[in-house]
Amino acid sequence: MANAAAIEKTEKLLQELRVYDGSSSTQAALIHQLDEIRNSLQQPREIANYYIKKGLVLIIINTCVELGVFDAVLPDTPASAEDIADKVGVDASILTRFLRAPMVEGFFSLAAPDGNKPQNPPSSPYLYRHTPASLSLRGLPAHTWWRTALTLPMSRFWRTPDYIRSHSTAELQDSRHNALAWAMGLESEGLTFFEALDRDKQYAGFWWSAMGMAEYGFGSFPWAKLWEDVSRKQDGRDRVFVVDVGGGRGKRLVEIIRELGEVKDKEPSLKPMMVLEDLGGVIGGETPVSIEGVKNVVYDFFQQGAEQPVKGAHVYHLRHVLHDYYDEKARQILKQVVDAMRPDSRVILCEYIIPEEHDLGHEIFPYVMDFLLFLAGGLERTHRQWQQLLDSVGLEIMNIWPSKDGHPEVDIEACLKDTKPERSL
């Protein structure tokens, strides 16, 4: 009986909510249980219709985002349909029709002018008040993410079945035959995803802005402890501590520098040398990256004859770089790192490790990312795939450092084979 199953699942959920620790992994598990409860109350056809309705709601919410509806209501000041309509240039009678479905999903709530719940029928025009859901879509950062993930690429995403049908298995795993270049009619030019992205200036602008604002997790590698250890060695302070390969605008380096704060407080003279490497257009341009204690180095690891410009660093750090590429290209990047390493150098990869098929867990985002990477010419890897990739360039995994808050991203610590650094972390 459906109700019995739903009751059992609900009771289990309530028990786990009482001991909820606030971690990302537990949150994902709880939300997964909510979905299971809903599924237990629905027939198969109803489950399919549920996702169809969600897709249609996304279209409506996208309409509101692009019209500026969420920005038209101030965070702490409810507004009437007429006030919103004047700001966005849409007749109020039409606007109210658009807002009904999002409101059922928790975007906006209704209030009477006196602040009470609206009456039915209303004695006076009611007001729209922000909720946490509608506030999440207010402002430039929210719009940037929304457009990067949905609005701009969606017409291309919908063509994925045609992309798959028209390409061989080998082509589907070749970064020069990625879905974006194909959808843009540029596949014959052999462009990678990022080269094709650069041809669409509007999308590229939103993309790089969104990447700069991204709030990704990271593993628990003990950066402060390592710096404290290596700085005691004779040449420890004379070598670059961290090279952030393909580090974008340096967001992770800033986080690492913050982690080193306790060591610097103990001994202010301990100032680790940091290097940020990426394409000139990423770290330079109209607003060059400027981080105290960090040297910018323009580096294109796919340029013919390229080699890692910083030799003998303590750590070569790559965050969400290798997942953009299949093994052939990933090896090309890693071999340049390996050639620059000393026996006691480390490689730290901040990436997802996809569970094996029999244990997918509850967090869906890594699998969504894997689908998007398929379209872009890359992939998320399992532990076995990471081992195979690293082994193929002469590296071996020393440790896996999980996130402190249960986030699915980890720090994969690797070293040159048969030359493990001292284990003191």
Image (spheres, rainbow, N blue to C red):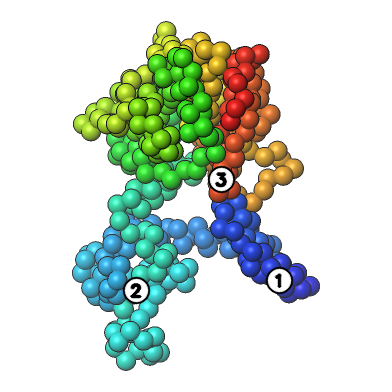
Question: Percent x, y for residue 48?
Answer: 62, 60
**Residue topped by disc 3:** 404
Q: State which mark lies toward you, 1 or 3.
A: 3
Query: Which of 298 and 201 lies nearest the eye of the viewer?
Result: 298
Residue under the point 47% across and 72% down: 104
Residue 187 visible in the snapshot: no
Task: State the CA–CA distance, disc 1 to disc 3.
Answer: 28 Å
Q: Amino acid type of disc 1?
A: Glu
Q: Amino acid type of disc 3?
A: Lys
Question: Percent x, y for residue 62?
Answer: 38, 57
User: Is disc 2 in contact with disc 1, using a CB cutoff of under 8 Å?
Assistant: no
Query: Which of 24 and 104 lies nearest the eye of the viewer?
Result: 24
Question: Percent x, y for residue 174?
Answer: 54, 23
Q: Which mark is residue 121?
A: none
**Residue topped by disc 1:** 11
Q: Earlier in the sequence, mark 1 or mark 3?
A: 1
